């Protein structure tokens, strides 16, 4: 794609030296031509006329030098004044106002108008008029009697020289002007063309050549007015591709670009000519469907869009399959403003994604209410964080064979004004999607480290604390620093802190996370894989975690007490874990039988309501000291 601004710029100013170069060349030509005429005239002239013509030649030579030095203005002044004075002198010494030489005046004025500036032109014409007036006065008052010579061949030569020099020069100058005009016209045309091109670029997406967001809004206004005037409705469909990122990541951006281009052509083909298809963002297309007959028609369009999206693409010898989700909003029932209707189509599209993707959903007011609820919840969460309203509860972790308390898992709680407690499952997903989890997570790390440090100061030297981490906390790359700060502020050794991660963390994100995990591992911090069994359970991922513990998800542990069906699975996890050199932790132990069974299966540690629920810090310490007492009693029954 040519750089249009540069194009426009060159179009306007192409060869800025050309006119002035042309001008000096022309000047040199005119001077040469005049000189040639003067030499001819000198040859046929006699007496004082000859001397006047000769001085004219000398002045012309000076003008030629100036022109040669590219001093066009000086050359013009010298040339024209020399001609004017020479012609005036010739008239004065000969025929006065009737002299042939005055024939040359108009020629000099034409040159002045074309080559010189207005000052030169007006000073010359003033001089000529004044000189003619003087000649007239001198003749009338009898002071100077004009000599009317008899006609000789010399007169013909003078006349011919004046006509030729003036005529040819004027012709050349006129041709220059014509050419200049032509060049200007051509350049003007090119500027207009590039302007149109720039305008096109500003309104279209360069990749698919479809109207972009800005142009889409203009189309929307036009169709909006049209539909409302005719009491018709305008459908707005937002198509978002479901798994486009992996195409870009695995096959490269060139393949992704080709896919978008092919999809754009497919969609264009199935839409009717009144519909407008726009590229709205990376993998988002917006379709405006004016004056549709009924909701079924709109649904049929959405289904057709999805069908085109799911049909296989063949790109760079690869067969690629993707899908899309479509959100539909209708004008005027769902809104009037472009931004509002797009937001509603977006909400409907998110609903389509939430409903399993590759479907379309119509906007309805409940969606907006849900989004407002989320917005309010986020506001409350920010306030809670600022005003230190969150709390941490601690669920004891025990060695199953003894059972002895070795530490606790810190679990976030949000107490409400009415005394109830919002559990993390209800607000952490929103904290993650909004990014607020980074700040909340930092607060959790700090508080958990401080708490563990307090326990140790009270004599429970070996207690450790486990903190849950969200994948979002790895994104901004400050986690290592946050962990270090929390440990330092609490004067807690790194081996007292354990971080709980889920396997999903490593899917897709790769190197950036592995690097941070390695750095944390080198500090001496231990990791456990949380919720094991529910995710990918991929051994390759486990190795990248550098994990020390594997936490079997509570769903397997709970069903252990209900049926024997899951026991082989739990047994297998424990054995695999051992062979990888990892310790196993069972979470969600709700009864003594499960605890005993797990201990027999070789599971190292456990936690669950059977031992204790997540407790406020003081209750947790109470639990630890009671357990210690029991242990002591068990060891020394007296
Ligand atoms: P998780 O990491 O799997 O935490 C264990 C969950 O199981 C906790 O739920 C705990 O209260 C519950 N639990 C423990 N023992 C039993 C039992 O015997 N039976 C049953 N039915 N449940 C038991 P909670 O506290 O509601 O936490 C839910 C999830 O929220 C956690 O699951 C964790 O993923 C997340 N979470 C909690 N605190 C934090 C935090 O500080 N940061 C992050 N990123 N996530 C957190
Ligand atoms: Ca956990
Ligand atoms: Ca868990």
Image: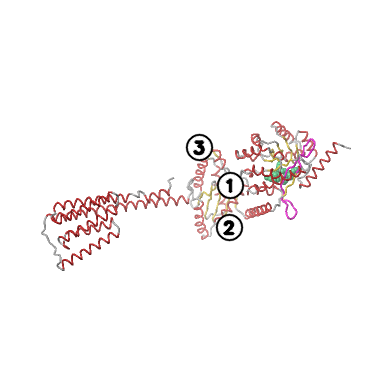
Per the rendering, the mark at residue 333 is 2
Is 432 inside the magenta-drawn segment?
Answer: no
> Of label 2 and label 3, which has the lower sequence position?
3
Q: Quadrant of ligand 2?
A: top right
Helix, strand or loop status at disc 1: strand
Magenta part of the protein: which range? Answer: 395-421
Per the rendering, the mark at residue 316 is 3
> Of label 3 and label 1, which has the lower sequence position?
3
Tell me which corner region of the image, top left, top right, bottom left or bottom right, holds residue 613.
top right
Question: Which secondary structure is most common in the magenta stretch?
Answer: strand
Label 3 beta carbon within 8 A of ligand 1: no
Q: Is residue 297 visible?
A: no
Tell me which corner region of the image, top left, top right, bottom left or bottom right, holds residue 147.
bottom left
Is 417 inside the magenta-drawn segment?
Answer: yes
Spatial CA span between label 1 and label 2 = 22 Å
Given contact means CB atoms under 8 Å apart, are the residues at marks 1 and 2 in contact? no
Pinpoint residue 23: horizontal percent, then vertical percent. Answer: 29, 51
Per the rendering, the mark at residue 325 is 1
Q: Nearer the viewer, residue 610 or 230?
A: 610
Q: Residue farthest to the right?
A: 638
Q: Is residue 488 visible?
A: yes
Residue at left offset 55%, top offset 53%: 236
Q: Nearer the viewer, mark 2 or mark 3?
A: 3
**Residue 493 left/right relative to 271:** right
Q: Nearer the viewer, mark 3 or mark 1?
A: 3
Q: Is residue 91 above or below residue 14?
A: below
Pinpoint residue 389: horizontal percent, then vertical percent. Answer: 71, 52
Helix, strand or loop status at disc 3: loop
Helix, strand or loop status at disc 2: loop
Q: Is residue 449 above or below residue 292?
A: above
Spatial CA span between label 3 and label 1 = 25 Å
The crowd level at tag 1 (other Cα within 10 Å; few <14, some 14-19, many 20+) is many
């Amino acid at each position: 794609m040519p750089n249009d601004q540069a194009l426009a710029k060159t179009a306007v100013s192409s060869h800025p030296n050309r006119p002035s170069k042309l001008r000096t060349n022309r000047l040199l030509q005119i001077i040469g031509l005049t000189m040639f005429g003067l030499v001819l005239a000198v040859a046929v002239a006699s007496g004082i006329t000859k001397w006047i013509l000769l001085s004219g030649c000398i002045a012309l030579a000076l003008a030629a030098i100036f022109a040669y030095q590219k001093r066009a203005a000086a050359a013009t002044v010298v040339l024209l004044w020399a001609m004017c004075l020479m012609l005036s002198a010739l008239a004065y010494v000969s025929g006065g106002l009737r002299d042939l030489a005055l024939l040359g005046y108009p020629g000099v004025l034409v040159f002045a108008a074309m080559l010189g500036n207005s000052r030169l032109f007006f000073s010359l014409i003033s001089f000529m008029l004044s000189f003619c007036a003087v000649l007239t006065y001198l003749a009338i008052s009898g002071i100077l009697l004009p000599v009317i010579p008899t006609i000789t061949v010399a007169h013909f030569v003078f006349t011919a020289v004046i006509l030729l020099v003036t005529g040819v020069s004027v012709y050349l100058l006129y041709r220059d002007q014509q050419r200049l005009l032509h060049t200007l016209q051509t350049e003007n045309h090119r500027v207009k063309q590039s302007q149109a091109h720039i305008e096109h670029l500003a309104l279209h997406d360069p990749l698919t050549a479809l109207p972009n967001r800005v142009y889409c809004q203009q189309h929307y206004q036009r169709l909006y007015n049209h539909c409302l005037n005719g009491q018709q409705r305008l459908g707005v469909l937002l198509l978002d591709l479901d798994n486009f990122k992996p195409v870009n990541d695995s096959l490269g951006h060139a393949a992704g670009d080709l896919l978008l281009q092919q999809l754009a052509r497919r969609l264009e083909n199935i839409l009717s000519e009144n519909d407008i298809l726009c590229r709205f963002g990376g993998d988002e297309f917006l379709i405006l469907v004016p004056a549709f007959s009924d909701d079924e028609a709109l649904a049929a369009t959405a289904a057709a869009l999805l069908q085109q999206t799911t049909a296989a693409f063949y790109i760079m010898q690869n067969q690629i399959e993707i899908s899309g989700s479509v959100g539909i909003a209708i004008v005027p029932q769902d809104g009037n403003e472009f931004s509002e209707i797009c937001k509603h189509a977006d909400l409907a599209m998110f609903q389509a994604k939430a409903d399993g993707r590759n479907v379309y959903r119509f906007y309805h007011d409940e969606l907006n209410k849900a989004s407002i609820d989320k917005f309010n919840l986020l506001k409350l969460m920010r306030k809670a964080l600022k005003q230190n309203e969150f709390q941490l509860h601690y669920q004891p972790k025990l060695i199953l064979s003894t059972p002895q308390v070795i530490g606790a898992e810190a679990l976030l709680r949000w107490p409400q004004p009415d005394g109830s407690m919002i559990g993390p499952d209800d607000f952490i997903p929103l904290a993650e999607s909004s990014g607020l989890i980074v700040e909340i997570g930092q607060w959790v790390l700090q508080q958990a480290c401080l708490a563990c440090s307090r326990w140790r100061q009270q004599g429970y030297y070996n207690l450790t604390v486990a903190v849950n981490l969200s994948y979002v906390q790895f994104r901004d790359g400050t986690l290592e620093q946050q962990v270090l700060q929390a440990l330092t502020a609490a004067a807690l050794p790194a081996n007292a802190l354990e971080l709980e991660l889920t396997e999903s963390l490593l899917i897709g994100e790769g190197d950036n996370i592995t690097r941070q995990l390695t750095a944390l591992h080198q500090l001496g911090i231990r990791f456990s894989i949380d919720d094991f069994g529910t995710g990918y359970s991929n051994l390759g991922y486990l190795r990248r975690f550098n994990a020390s513990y594997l936490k079997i998800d509570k769903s397997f542990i709970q069903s252990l007490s209900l049926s024997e069906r899951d026991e082989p699975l739990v047994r297998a996890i424990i054995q695999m874990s051992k062979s990888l050199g990892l310790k196993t932790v069972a979470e969600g132990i709700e009864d003594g039988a499960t605890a005993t069974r797990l201990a027999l299966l070789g599971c190292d540690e456990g936690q669950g309501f059977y031992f204790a629920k997540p407790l406020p810090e003081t209750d947790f310490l109470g639990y630890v000291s009671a357990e210690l007492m029991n242990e002591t009693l068990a060891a020394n029954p007296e």
